[in-house]
Amino acid sequence: MSKTVKKFVCEKCGQEHLQWSGRCTACGTWNSLVEESKVASPKGRQTSWLGERAPISKLGEIDSSSMGERWQTGVAEFDRVIGGGVLPGSFGLLGGTPGVGKSTLILQLMARIASLGKEVLYISGEESAGQIKERANRLAVDQSQIQVLCESNLEEILGHLERERPQFVVVDSIQTLFSVEFPASPGSVTQVRESAALLMRFAKAKGAAVMLIGHVTKDGTIAGPKTLEHMVDYVLYLEGVGEPGRLLRSVKNRFGNLSEIGLFKMTPKGLAELANPNQLFLEQFHWGKPGMAIFANFEGSRTLFMEVQVLVGDTEQRQPARMAVGLERNRLQVMVAVMEKHLGLDLSGNDVYLNLAGGFRVGETAIDMAVVAALLSSHLNKPLPERSVFAGELALTGEFRVVPGLEERASEAERCGFTKFYLPQRALARLEKKGVRLEMVGIDTLDQLMRQVAETL
Ligand code: TYD
Ligand code: MG
């Protein structure tokens, strides 16, 4: 006999509730609870490895080399982000908006892993074998060793895995899978979580590497995000930047460096690595226009130049707009407040819009100086000097603070033909000693930056 248990799950955070309510008590989202009745089966699944008992061992006696060597795909931009290659037994997630190129990237990577002599299996719940074949033809990858399974029924998939025991499994996408044991529809939190849980057990029990592909919803989250992010060993996101650029970012990695990023370019023949991405971005900058400043972003081991655009406009509204795309709005509000206080500026009659060109998103506080410079440039209607670049964090006291990686930022700026680097004064002497040849302008306070912008012709 099986017993039906009624429960409600938050579609946003995955929190379970015994009763329906208008608002999720865990994440505070309104109208996000959906009923999901779960059939609790006393028998459980019939797959044999699910019943296997894991032995208890002493930590000191465990041979960590049993995890095996990482499989290097040879696609350097990917290998670096994932921490040196795909680790056998790892369970991860590759997310991105529909159409960004997840299926393309993974097919290219699978061909590489197959060429290492690994058994790879591509499970698609979205496309037919014919469509996958079309894509493989277009990418001109070696198709001989890639096995394909077009299936979305979880029980069927588990059966295949049990029989075939592939070493590298990709599920495209996790949102298409469904288990007949749950009445919820594919893509719902219950289905996503249950499918992922069983695939994880397969990965851990059999030492296979399993990678889930997940679609990101409009607000930037993968369905059932919290539950999935907790379960997996790594989360990679593929994002579009400076079309046709693509940025691969790791937001969680149990076995690797977190801040590494990889850069690609979408071409008619799939994703190509971008060894020199700044070349692509530099061509797109709008030099000589008021309200734009270039920020030298430094993440992982990469310096990337990004165009910060700010528009300061008059408004009659009592509540002027403060909008930001690519940067947290709160940060912009804080910067405006600090500028009002320390420069005696009155922006209460002005809307302020910020946009990070090309679809970049930045969390690094080093962007502050570029934001302030772009804002002042728009406000005073004075363009900043061409080929100049900024990096520095704004403190609430109105001073600029030193940020990490200034030397790396300076040397990449030099290499890319920038002529001026605005940075906190305190770092200047150290950089000069290191032999930075670029003209450096030390800026300690908002006042000094304001004077620089005002004097620019
Ligand atoms: P796809 O990998 O299907 O995206 P996702 O799996 O993330 O939804 O790629 C979709 C887009 O990429 C599609 O609009 C066509 C384009 N594309 C190319 O430009 N070149 C290629 O070689 C391929 C395969 C796709
Ligand atoms: Mg796809």
Image: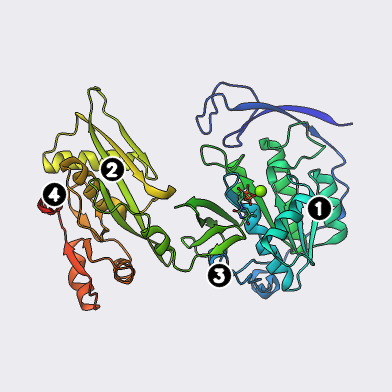
On residue 8, the disc is none
When asked about the image quadrant of residue 314, the answer is: top left
Q: Are marks 4 and 3 in contact (CB under 8 Å)?
A: no
Q: Which residue is mark 4?
A: 450
Query: How dense is the environment of label 2, judged by Cα within 10 Å: few (below 14), some, or many (20 and up)?
Result: many
Q: Is residue 381 visible?
A: yes
Q: Which residue is mark 3?
A: 76
Query: Label 4 sits on what residue type?
Result: Met
Disc number lying in front (2 or 1): 2
Q: Secondary structure at mark 4?
A: helix
Disc number lying in front (4 or 2): 2
Which residue: 86% across, 31% down? 2
Q: Secondary structure at mark 3?
A: helix
On residue 310, the disc is 2
Left or right: 195 with respect to 352?
A: right
Left or right: 347 with respect to 200?
A: left
Above/below status of 331 relative to 440:
above
Location of the N terminus (image quadrant): top right
Give the percent coordinates (x, y) of residue 63: 68, 74
On residue 149, the disc is 1
Query: How dense is the environment of label 1, judged by Cα within 10 Å: few (below 14), some, or many (20 and up)?
Result: some
Give the percent coordinates (x, y) of residue 156: 85, 47
N-term mark: 1 or 4: 1
Q: Are marks 4 and 2 in contact (CB under 8 Å)?
A: no
Which residue: 23% across, 63% down? 421
Mark 2 vs mark 1, CA separation in Å = 49 Å
379 or 21: nearer the viewer:
379
Above/below status of 71 relative to 252:
below
Q: Are marks 3 and 2 in contact (CB under 8 Å)?
A: no
Which residue: 66% across, 73% down? 64
Left or right: 450 with respect to 355?
A: left
Query: Label 3 sits on what residue type?
Result: Ala
